[in-house]
Every structure is written in structure tokens, then in C-alpha cells.
Amino acid sequence: MGSPLSLRDDHDSSELRRLARRSRHAGQSRRLLALAAIYDGASRGEAALLAGTDRQSIRDWVVRFNADGPDGLVDRHGGGQKARLTQEMLSALKTRLEEGPIPAVHGVVRWRLCDLCGWLHETYGVSLSETRLGQIIRREGFRLLTARPRHYRQDTEAQDIFKKSSPVSWRRSGPD
């Protein structure tokens, strides 16, 4: 079995306890107190009991502390899943949304999410659910706005004549 990793020389137990008191992160405080116990001469096993963890976690904390100091003991964000759409794909999607579909070519008068998902898959080989694509589109500032549908053979002149010749369906109340 190898010897335990040594701690940095630029800190001591009292300084780590002071930093633990002032820390705004509970996990960092717990880790600092465990390392302070090691500075005071406690074994790795005793520090693990004090922190409520195992010796492997203590070793990981020592490595992080030696590399980055007390700031290395703050919980880090995992980063999450990488975005499936690159900036190039996103700008192409924005352009496609702004231009809109050509009814004779695309067969639709407005883009549907299923159409855009299919286009992304055909063009870039990226498959997204309609729900996720809708979230991305809304995040980029686009909203689903559609005009009231009108029949293509609608005659506005005939409508105006009808409005003028129709009887008034209500009368003013009050004395005649």
C-alpha cells in the first residue's frame, strides 16, 4: 500500500477552519474541516469518519485541494449534455423560419414542428423531438402566430356589398 498524498504547504488547519466558517457552500465547509483534521495529524480514516464519507473521497478531496486550493472543494456543475444543434445549424433554422415555406414547393403554408424536425434530420442528420425543437425555437424568440385562414376564392367586394345591404339587427333602446 502506498503512502498517502501530502497536502499543500501554503495552508494550515486554523486557516482551513476559518475558511470553512466563512464558506457559503456546505459541501466545501465539510471538506475543509476534514482536511483541517488531516493537517492536525488525523489519519485519512479518521478524517473520513469526521466527514461522514470514505477514504477514497478524502483522497479525491486532497487531489482537488492540492490542484486548486480551497476553491477546488466547491461542488462543480456536471455540465450537462452537449447541445445537438451547432451554431451553424441554429442559424440555418432561424433563416428557414424567417423565410417561411413556399406552399407550392413544401406543401404547407406555415412550418410545423414535424416538418422542421424532418428537415433537420434530412439536412444535418440530427434527430430532435418536436417538443425539444419547440423549446429551442421559443428560446430563440420565435412564437407560433398564424393569421386567420381565408378561402382563396374569397370576394371582398361581395362582402362589402353584403355588409351594406344587410338590415341592422339591433335597435337603440330608449325613448323614440
Image: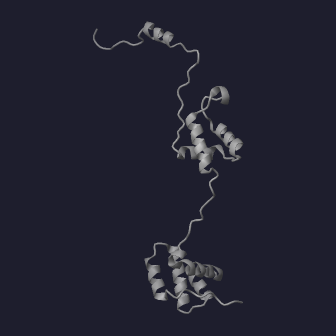
**Residue 111 as seen in the image, left or right of residue 169:** right
Q: Which residue corresponds to the image point at 46% horizontal and 87% vertical from the top-left?
A: 14
Q: Where is residue 143 in the image (x, y as percent from the top left)?
A: 52, 39
Q: Where is residue 151 in the image (x, y as percent from the top left)?
A: 58, 19
Q: Residue at x 57, y 41 (%)?
A: 94
> Between residues 116 and 58, which one lies in front from this camera angle?
116
Give 33 or 138, whichever is nearer the viewer. Answer: 138
**Most distant residue in the bottom direction:** 41
Q: Position of residue 107 (x, y in %)?
A: 67, 28
- At 53% from the left and 45% from the top, the residue drawn is 140
Residue that sits furthest to the top in the current view: 165
- Please report the residue visible at 44 percent of the width from the left and 83 percent of the height from the top: 18
Residue 80 horizontal side relative to residue 28, left or right: right
Quadrant of the rendering where the N terminus is positioned: bottom right
Q: How is the image coloured?
A: one colour
Coordinates of residue 66 in the picture (x, y in percent): 56, 81
Report whether 165 appears left or right of 154: left
Instruction: Give the answer, above or below, for where 118 lies relative to 2.
Output: above
Q: Which residue lies furthest to the left in this view?
A: 175
